[in-house]
Amino acid sequence: MLDQNSLATIFTDARTYSYWLDKPVTDEQLHRIYDLMKFGPTSSNSCPARIVFVRSSDEKGKLVACMSSGNMEKTRKAPVTAIIGMDMEFYEKLPTLFPHADARSWFAGKPESISSNALRNSSLQGAYLMIAARSVGLDCGPMSGFDAEKINEAFFHGTSIKVNFVCNLGYGDAARLHERLPRLPFDEACAIV
């Protein structure tokens, strides 16, 4: 069981950041994030997430042009922005990732199943990415305000990958945080039956 400090780092004290300190994120940190997140469970071990870590100023410029106006500056200033994509041909990797069954046949030629599974499982993997980032000392700023067609064209052109969501990574400026927004209590969000 994790101790209270670990839980605070990952959940209770963690915040969504929009403003960033001018402190770099290293390649080693990005590798560590992936090496942690890849162990999070997905249906049939499908692992459909494909991630582009955008750091260079040229690539950041391309990404900023795809963001909604409210997300442009926070993306420009973040040390790294992760584009969490979903491979719509994830099932082609299933003979390796799920070798004890013919899992590829569960998806190949079934666009509705492909779409729902790619979205669901890449979303899970994006959440694992945020937990992993927080666990290695980084802060996160997930966003869904962007032009998906533009991101797909700029970063995934000619591939089977489509963007799911985007997440800024770095060291958040805690001095610019607003008060934490409320969350629903257990009885409003959950039922035990």
Image (cartoon, rainbow, N blue to C red):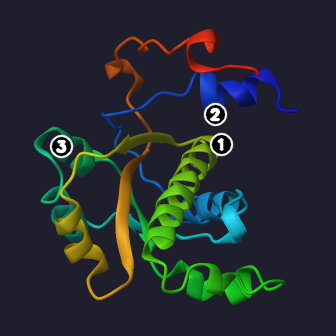
Say if mark 1 contacts mark 2, CB within 8 Å. yes
- Image location of residue 19, percent across then percent down: 30, 34
Q: Amino acid at mark 1?
A: Ser
Q: Secondary structure at mark 1?
A: helix
Q: Residues within 10 Å of mark 2 (few under 14, many from 20)?
A: many
Picture residue at 43% right of the left edge, 14% below the top: 180
Q: Residues within 10 Å of mark 1 (few under 14, many from 20)?
A: some
Q: Could you tell me which quadrant the N terminus lies in?
A: top right
Instruction: Identify the amino acid type marked 2.
Output: Ile
Spatial CA span between label 3 and label 2: 25 Å
* Mark 3 vs 2, N-terminal side: 2
Residue at image mark 2:
10
Helix, strand or loop under label 2:
helix
Compared to residue 15, the image places residue 81 above or below, namely below
Above or below, comparing residue 106 to residue 48 in the picture: below
Which type of secondary structure does the marked residue at label 3 adopt? helix
* Disc 1 to disc 2, C-alpha distance: 6 Å
Point 36% across, 53% down: residue: 166
Among the two numbered marks 1 and 2 on one chain, the one whose residue lies closer to the N terminus: 2
- Residue 88 at what x, y percent from top left? 44, 76
Question: What's under tag 3, amino acid-wise?
Answer: Glu
From what the image shows, is residue 82 above or below residue 189? below
Checking the image for residue 73, the label placed there is: 3
Front position in the image: 15 or 173? 15
Quarter holding the C terminus?
A: top right
